[in-house]
Image: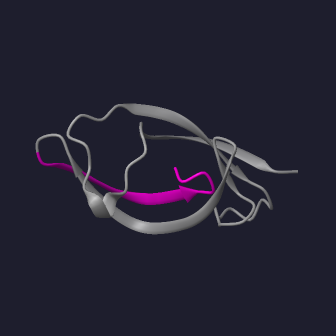
Amino acid sequence: MAKTYTAQTFDNNFDPANGTPVNVTVITVTLTDDNEDGILSPGSDMVNGETISSVYNGDTITYGNGKFVTGVTFYTSSGG
């Protein structure tokens, strides 16, 4: 049985490589680890019900007035 987690992230879809919106809103998402290995991987694991297609660990984004955060960027099968 899949294990689910909740996490906070920024709302709206954006690609950190192409810049971050100035105004961001924090939302809660559901992460699903289909094979319960503790690693969110492309193929079967999901973010809010969308299959993960790519994972980039250690992405750093700058937002607002020079604030930054380092974490994981997920791309999903729907392009989000």
Q: In which image quadrant can residue 33 be found?
A: bottom right
Residue 21 falls in image quadrant: top left
Is residue 25 a member of the stretch shown in magenta?
no
Colour scheme of the rendered structure? one colour
Q: How many marks?
A: 0
Residue shown at the point (37%, 56%) measured from the top left: 15
Q: Position of residue 62 (x, y in %)?
A: 21, 52
Residue located at (56% from left, 67% from top): 54
For this orientation, the residue located farthest to the front is 78
Q: Position of residue 22 (x, y in %)?
A: 20, 40
Position of residue 10 measured from the top left corner of the image (x, y, whole percent): 39, 40
Can you say whether 67 is above or below 59 in the image? Answer: above
Q: Is residue 60 left or right of residue 77?
A: left
User: Closer to the camera, 68 or 47?
Assistant: 47
Rendered residue at 63%/58% (across/down): 52
The answer to whether residue 70 is magenta is: yes
Q: Residue at x 63, y 56 (%)?
A: 77
Q: What residue occupies the far right of the structure in this picture?
A: 1
The stretch in magenta equals: 66-80
Position of 57 relative to 15 (above/below): below
Q: Magenta: predominant secondary structure element?
A: strand
In which image quadrant can residue 37 be found?
bottom right
